[in-house]
Amino acid sequence: MEEKNMQEQIDELNRKMDRVLEFVEIQHRKREELDDLMSDLSIISKDAFNSTVVALDKAGVEIDPCGIQCLMIKLIRNLGTFGEMIELMESAKDLALDLTPIVRQVGLDVIQKMNELDEKGYIDSFMTIFKNLTDKETVDAMVRLSQAVADVKMDDRMDDKSFWQLFKQMRSKEVRKSLSYSLRLLEAINKK
């Protein structure tokens, strides 16, 4: 019985040893594959580097190795910032996609409202008003009017005149011209 028990232990040890050897073999294969990969990558990177150097040399570009090293350090140091910048651009793109239908609808609403105003004749009226308001003579007259309103204030002593005093003031050429112009202006407004 002891012999049988010992044989079972030996068999168990053999099975464990087979597993260990199998694991070692797998690790050995992986190590060889990794070495082959590193060797291939080394060859490829050397070829790429040499090709880049030749292309830069033909283009007349000189590279400062310290500058490249500093640039690489800055790039690595600011990876987080680049990630934030990319997230910001993605957010801006999403915002633009979200706003596109809204802006399109607002544009359509504005066009529709402008069409309604045009059908009612308001656009032509606004254009005429704007044209008249930008006329040099009209602008000069508005400047004179605003200056007069700013300069001349209501004064109880000066403006409390009798009918006779007003009648005498109407004899002045400027007053007659202003009254005549005001009356013509009122008539023209009522006719339109």
Image (cartoon, grey):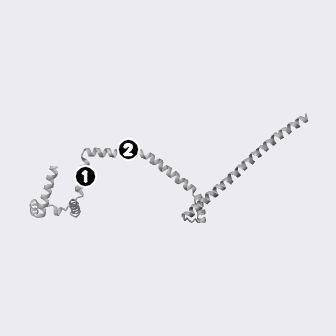
CB-based contact (under 8 Å), mark 1 and mark 2: no
Name the residue tied to disc 2. 105
Tell me if residue 124 comes above or below residue 59 in the rendering: above
- The secondary element bearing badge 1 is classed as helix
Label at residue 127 = 1
Q: How far across and how far down the image is residue 118, in percent? A: 26, 46
Amino acid, disc 2: Gln
Amino acid, disc 1: Met
Q: How far across and how far down the image is residue 155, in percent? A: 19, 62
Q: Quadrant of residue 48?
A: bottom right
Classify mark 2: residues with Cα within 10 Å, few (<14), some (14-19) or many (20+): few
Tell me if residue 16 comes above or below residue 138 in the rendering: above
Q: Quadrant of residue 65?
A: bottom right
In the rendered structure, the answer to whether residue 109 lies left or right of residue 180 reads right
**Front residue of this view, candidates 127 and 62:** 62
Q: How far across and how far down the image is residue 97, in percent? A: 45, 46
| Number of numbered callouts drawn | 2
Mark found first going from the N terminus, 1 or 2: 2
Tell me if residue 100 comes above or below residue 182 in the rendering: above
